[in-house]
Amino acid sequence: MSNLFRCPICSSDFTAQDHTLVCENRHQFDRAKEGYFNLLPVQFKKSKEPGDNLEMVQARRAFLAAGHYSFLQSELVEKVKQYNVHALLDMGCGEGFYTQALKVDDRTQVYGLDISKAAVRYAAKRYPDCYFAVASCKQTPFNDCLFDGIISVFAPLFVEEAHRLLSEGGLVIQVSPGPNHLYELKSKIYSDVRLHDLPQCPSQFELVEQHIIRRDIELIAKDALNLIQMTPFAWKFRPEQLEDINNQVKIPVTLEFCITVLRKRAV
């Protein structure tokens, strides 16, 4: 059992008791049968089931299982190896598709956090070599300076929290949409498609590198519909537009990602 988690309520260190984490103030969190801890107390929730719902999780699982984002996964693995990262946190880990791949050797310790219980349940059940928790990425259940690397894939980057969690010289490896990401799908619902802006470097960090990776692919209808379901603009599609996609044999799609590597500045 990992001992890096701290109490999300009072920030005290935990003591492990069988399959339970208990802090000095007797706040107690049980390990779920799938292997994760739910460290998102009810008073911290803004809704009954925060984060991605089961339908979105299932759509993303099916799409990622088809291998269309494997080139992005491989790129992240190479970055972890290149920068010799061994204590790693995936902030907004979802179902663990990237998280589990980042355990590149026996020395690498990987944690994944997400506010979606449905996503974390799946991740923990399938990838027991990583540590998963349902928790807020804005107020994470960890002490300061524990990680030498943070991964953020299509998730909000909470800059102050990332800076707090990283050790001296620690890195953020951030994945955001490239300018033309999913251009063809977006053009079906927007008359004027706005290209994505590249992320800027926060003042607490220095920019190490930033580059674009891209694949132009064709999707079968099932995969295209799953991809739409896992995007923020899914609700903008009208039923007749989705039906039109479902009737197409091949749907061209641009996959474009911006990889940004940031290094923590000394305070």
Image (cartoon, rainbow, N blue to C red):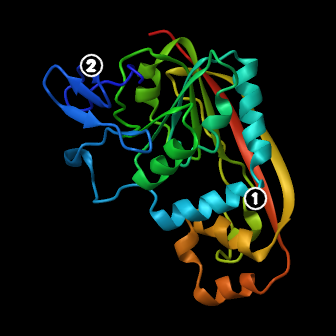
What residue is drawn where x is 27% and y is 19%?
A: 15
First of labels 2, 1 by sequence position: 2
Q: Position of residue 19 (x, y in %)?
A: 32, 31
Residue where numbered disc 1 is placed? 66
Q: Which of pointers 2 and 1 indicates the residue nearer the eye?
A: 2
Q: Position of residue 118 (x, y in %)?
A: 44, 55
User: Mark 2: which secondary structure?
Assistant: strand
Q: Position of residue 265 (x, y in %)?
A: 53, 14
- Callout 2: few (<14), some (14-19), or many (20+) C-alpha neighbours within 10 Å? some
The answer to whether residue 21 shows anywhere in this view is yes
- Callout 1: few (<14), some (14-19), or many (20+) C-alpha neighbours within 10 Å? few
The answer to whether residue 155 shows anywhere in this view is no
Vertical comparison of 74 with 207: above or below: below
Does 180 sit left or right of 61 as displayed?
A: right
Q: What's the amino acid at mark 2? A: Thr
What residue is drawn where x is 21% and y is 23%?
A: 23
User: Mark 1: which secondary structure?
Assistant: loop
Looking at the image, the residue that sits furthest to the left is 25
Quarter of the image holding residue 254?
Answer: bottom right
Q: Residue 15 got which mark?
A: 2
Q: What's the amino acid at mark 1? A: Ala
Q: Position of residue 248 (x, y in %)?
A: 81, 83
What residue is drawn where x is 27% and y is 21%?
A: 14
Observer-nearest residue: 57 or 150? 57
Q: Quadrant of the N terminus?
A: top left
What residue is drawn where x is 45% and y is 49%?
A: 121
Vertical comparison of 182 with 159: above or below: below
